[in-house]
Amino acid sequence: MAADAYTFIFAILISLVNLFLQVFFTIMYSDLECDYINPIDLCNRLNNYVLPEAAAHAALTIVFLLTGHWIVLLLNAPIFAYNAHKIYTNTHLLDATEIFRTLKKHKQESFIKLACYLVFFFLYLYCMIAALVRED
Amino acid sequence: MSQEHPEQGSSSKRRVYPQQQYDFAAAQPAGYSMPDPTQPYGASASPSAAMYGGAHAIPSPAAFQPHTANVQSGAFAPPPGTPGSAVDPPVAPGVAGGMAYGAPQAAGAAYGYQGLTNQMGNLNIGGGGAYQGGAPPGAAGGAHMAAPTQLNQIYNTDLLQNFPPPISDLTLPPPPVILPPGSSVTGNPDPNADSEFMRCTLNTVPTSSSLLKKSKLPFALVIRPYTALRDADENVPTVADTTIARCRRCRSYINPYVVFLEGGARWRCNMCNLTNDVPSGFDYDAVANKPRDRWSRAELNHSVVEFVAPAEYMVRPPQPLVYVFVLDVSVHSVKNGLLATAARTIKESLSRIPNVDNRTRVGFLAVDSSLHYFAIPRKEDVAEGEGEEGEENEWPEPRMMVVSDIDDPFLPMPTDLLVNLSQCKGGIEKLLDSLQSMFAHTVNPASALGSAVVAAHKLIANIGGKIVCLTSTLPNVGQGKLEVRDDKKALGTSREGQMLQTASTFYKSFAVECSKTQVTVDMFLFSSHYQDVASLSNLPRFSAGQTYFYPGWIASNPEDANKFALEFSEYLSQELATEAVLRVRSCDGIRMSAFYGNFFSRSSDLCSFSTFPRDQSYVIEVNIEETIVKPWVTFQAAILHSTASGERRIRVITRAFPTSALLQDIYASADQIAITTYLANKAVEKALQKGPQDARDLLMNRLNEMFTCYKKDLMTTNVGASAPLQFCTNLRMLPLLVNALIKHIGFRKTSQIPSDLRSAALCLLSTLPDKYLIQYIYPNFYNLIFMPDEAGLPDAETGQIVMPPCTNLSGEHLISHGLFLIDDGQVMFLWVGRDAQPALLQDVFGVSSITEVPTGKTELPVLDNQFNERIRNIISKAREKTDAITYQHLYVVREDGEPALRLWATTHLVEDRVEQSGVTYHQFLTSIREKLNS
Ligand SMILES: [Zn+2]
């Protein structure tokens, strides 16, 4: 199998993980809205996953950079830049004191990321199949 | 208005609603609640005389009924302008006698004429009688009889014509809440909670969210659960029998607006309409062991009541009150005298700390670059109350333990750090006496305040309580250490917003920790240098505490020492509730959407308070999610808390408001004071997120939107470039208040305000109860040489000092031979004109020439003449309060004196240009008009 196919299999795995994480985030946010969870527990739980999510995505972006997949790299760049900016300005973690005020924003972010990862997932799947077909 | 107990017996069943309106009129002669329909505000040739209360001044011949008119249906003529369509709905037989007059009666109530009122009172006897005979008064028919009620009428004011703004409006009560007759279940004349406890920006609630959106008015509640620092100054009825009737579905508490059904066996919830059983003990007096009259129950008569809660309402038994004092002992606090003054004040106030059942505990922690713990040993063999005075010297010495590990503070010993106030009073006093000498020679400039708070928290985490921090040093070592980030060049620029945000996440994350363990942190800050109030204030903000800022405080100045000692003593004496939660409920389709104030939001609609302070108010934004079909809706705030005496209690505040689908009704009943309180909170939130510029923009935009809406939808005639700037009369102070807010120290565009001062001002703006907030935004300004004869002297009837009338805050009133007082509730300025007469100076200051007048922070000398006494009376009256701890400094300002002081005083003249916020109020209005007309 070609290196391309391996790259995209890796990409599919990463985007699956991130997809699940975003679903988890979204569910947790609506739990907070319905008062099934208190803001302190929510922040403690979600904050564990903020950095791993960003790191996984960053790793994938770097793989694309190294393997020269420019188009998918470009597609991933906005999310990468967004995550990097949040970490740089130290605003990536959820703040239990402000969570109800910022909940709408967080939910929006989660939805957008969810949509992106979903699209990317199918894109990578297509790319992988294309790479395999090309090899045959 | 006080809540009166209804008279007992059959007369209590009388619905005396119109009488209430009359009381209102009598108590507030200038109230705009009873406008004469033929004399709209400002319609008279002399606008200032006729507006507000013109109805009383100028009887209108057509509408006025003679006082002695007979009780005849024919004698009753609705005033012209009252829609003749006040048609009765079909009424149930048997109540016809009462209801036939129901509609006009409501109309009369809205106008509140004395004559009409008397008729109504008589008419009501018939009406009420129909309901008597065991059945709950007003139950079946009255409450849901959507009798057409005349809501407040809208009146226009031309703001530029009506100049200067009539500031006496600022003290008026909110527009009356006009409920259909019979909406309350008992005959209490005033079933609605006093507007001090709860007020709403819209005293007529829009029926749909589209109408609310269209109106551009904010919809929010301003809630102030306590109106006094101590219980003795408050008069809230208590329901002590722990029989608490609550709705099964929405969990709201039984209140004066419910309806009893099935002969009183069941009650219908006024929020969600569910029918509930009346609890078994409801009609039984458990204390006297005999049946009781249901109608005498306080919760059916009063809208502010306190229930004593049974054990189900406790997560754990009520904990004792705990105070841990974290005292800064670095060189700054020793030098400026804070340590000595604080220790002395605490010692003198020990007996004022609430300690009803001798459970209160205290602890002390001193902090510089290390932590100093104090173990106060118990005197085992001294029996309580036995010769303590004489044996005081025999108390064992308190021991000090120093822990220099500030990164992970630990407690050096498990006991004796937190001691019972009553049992260890002698030891505590001994410790407080020796503190100053212990640290007198320190040269340590460091402060590990963050670590000290963590240590103090460890000490009380399993009980909860208050951590009181007194510091004059920037916390520069240990946890949550901060750096000087006060960049003078950034002031007034877009970078200023950052300096209002916290520099260390510690102060937010630790606040969460505190809230979890029922701990409140209060900050008393005294630095003469940068202290990062912005960061430190986050701990109080999210743990239901408060930040008190004393810039440049120094104990060698007797005024400084006095102010702090008085305020701190008041602070310690206020009665505290602990482990409190606040929840506001309302009818279906209405949701509380955002919460403002110092607390932690534990869930989407629950505010949690580790301890409940008594001098703050809270703003809750309301969302309409479904169309409201009810003729009136109810809001109910419930504060579940433990009292210092170990009782679990629920304070319930209920208020009902009529609804309307008409935009003019919404505007006519909008409450400008509540709207300003909401806008101030909103602007503070914005300033903390983005910076003062965004806050100013927000204020300006919200005001412009209201003007645009008002002009577009409520003014049909005035178009064109020269159209006057019109607004409804009940909101005519709003532009002034918004303009004053934009010029306020918290938001003003300037490069002169250090960020510490700004942060402290923002803390006040988001917590002050409305009456102090309005004064803080638009200070009281008194002309002391042209005041009425009675001003400054005790009133013949009440014995209270009469205050002179307020003057508009404009420099044109500052005549050069005058004497003025500006009081914003936090600080007072006594302004002496440059040409003040020697006789005046002699009377007031006891000096013969203006150059001898002492300026700056000072007190007036006590001189033996009436004028001096009157002015001193006025000043002390302005400082006298039972619901706030603030004691204003008095600055004497000479017009020809120190420029900085003079400039500071003149920034309070908010109708003029203030620094770079360079428009006068008149220009402000003109620019709004131009924008509207273009
Ligand atoms: Zn209910």
Image (cartoon, coloured by chain):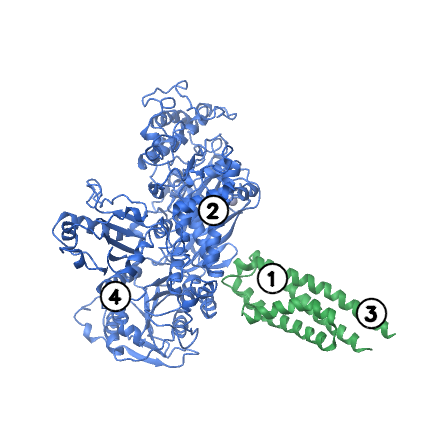
Q: In the rendering, what colour is chain B?
A: blue
Q: Which residue is mark 4?
A: B345
User: Same chain, marks 2 and 4?
Assistant: yes
Q: Nearer the viewer, residue B30 or B200?
A: B30
> Is ligand 1 closer than 8 angstroms to the Cβ of mark 2?
no
Residue reaching furthest left?
B864
Mark positioned earlier in the residue sequence (3 or 1): 1
Assign a secondary structure to mark 1: helix
* Residue B382 percent across, percent down from the top left: 23, 72
Q: CA distance from mark 2 to mark 4?
A: 46 Å
Assign a secondary structure to mark 2: helix
Q: Nearer the viewer, residue B844 or A28?
A: B844
Q: Quadrant of the N terminus of chain B?
A: top left
* Residue B40 percent across, percent down from the top left: 40, 31
Q: Does residue A60 lie above or below B350 as drawn?
A: below
Circle 4: residue type: Thr
Q: CA distance from mark 2 to mark 3?
A: 59 Å
Q: Which residue is mark 3?
A: A130
Q: Nearer the viewer, mark 2 or mark 3?
A: 2
Q: Which residue is mark 2?
A: B703
Assign a secondary structure to mark 3: helix
Cβ atoms under marks 1 and 4 closer than 8 Å: no
The crowding category of the residue bearing disc 4, from other C-alpha atoms within 10 Å (few below 14, some 14 to 19, many at least 20), is many
Instruction: Answer with left or right where residue A10 lies relative to residue B314.
Output: right
* Residue B395 percent across, percent down from the top left: 22, 75
Q: CA distance from mark 3 to mark 4?
A: 80 Å
Cβ atoms under marks 2 and 3 closer than 8 Å: no
Q: CA distance from mark 1 to mark 4?
A: 49 Å
Q: Does residue B506 lie above or below B674 as drawn?
A: below
Instruction: Answer with left or right where residue B21 lies relative to residue B835.
Output: right
Kindly indicate which chain is depicted in green in the rendered structure.
A
